[in-house]
Image: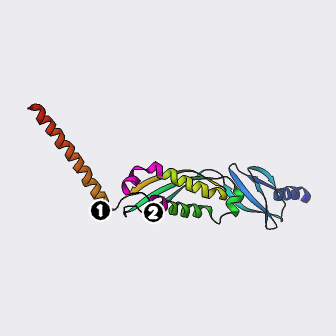
Amino acid sequence: MIAGGAVPLVLGTFIRRLPQANAVVVERFGRYTRTLNAGLNIVVPFADVMRNRIDLREQVVSFPPQEVLTLDTLAVKIDTVVYFQVTDARAATYEVTSYLRAIEHLTVTSLRDFCGYMDLERILSSREEISAGLRGILDEATGKWGIRINRIVVNTIDLPAAAREALERGAHARSDGRVTRLRAGDEAGEL
């Protein structure tokens, strides 16, 4: 009876079950040996240590708005969302301390560098260009970490109050100019 209960207990220490879209980095005596994938896996008790469980699904991270100085020396706040996926659990574990923090810092510095060469008008009209440029920079840098950047979305671009008021005044002036031209055209047609 005791032997019958010990068999499942011993087998339970050898067999590990991993759910779909997960990977686990395994070390034997402190050295990386392999990566376990979804399903049943056999490990050596007391020798193998499951060091890090990695979620292989696409992850979405929203970063707080970052202040960026434009080419025409205006400070705007840009809010970004990064979609990424871990493709290599070993690299994500050993090539970078915290891949999430590293992606955040890389996004912030790349955003400031990329948008620093643009004036306000270009930043406001080039969200897709900014997203594509950042994606290229981040994907190149994170490749060695075993991470693929799928998308970067520029959510909001907040302007300083003075710049927002100046843009609104300019839009009203253009609108008033169109109305004046239309009225002048109507009056000329009546004559």
Q: Is residue 95 inside the magenta stretch?
A: no
| Quadrant of the frame with the N terminus | bottom right
* Residue at 71%, 50% in the rendered image: 19
Q: Position of residue 159 (x, y in %)?
A: 36, 59
* Magenta segment main secondary structure: helix
| Label 1 sits on residue | 162
Instruction: Decide which of tag 2 and tag 1 comes sooner along the chain.
Output: 2
Q: Which residues are magenta?
A: 111-129
How is the structure coloured here? rainbow
Q: Nearer the viewer, residue 47 or 178?
A: 178
Q: How dense is the environment of label 2, judged by Cα within 10 Å: few (below 14), some, or many (20 and up)? A: some
Q: Position of residue 109 (x, y in %)?
A: 51, 63
Please name the amino acid that badge 1 sits on.
Ala
Q: Which mark is residue 130?
A: none
Q: Is residue 153 left or right of residue 14?
A: left
| Label 2 sits on residue | 66
* Residue at 82%, 59% in the rendered image: 13
Question: In the structure shown, which secondary structural element does the residue marked by tag 2 occupy?
Answer: strand
Residue 153 visible to the viewer: no
Residue 123 visible to the viewer: yes
Question: In the structure shown, which secondary structural element does the residue marked by tag 1 occupy?
Answer: helix
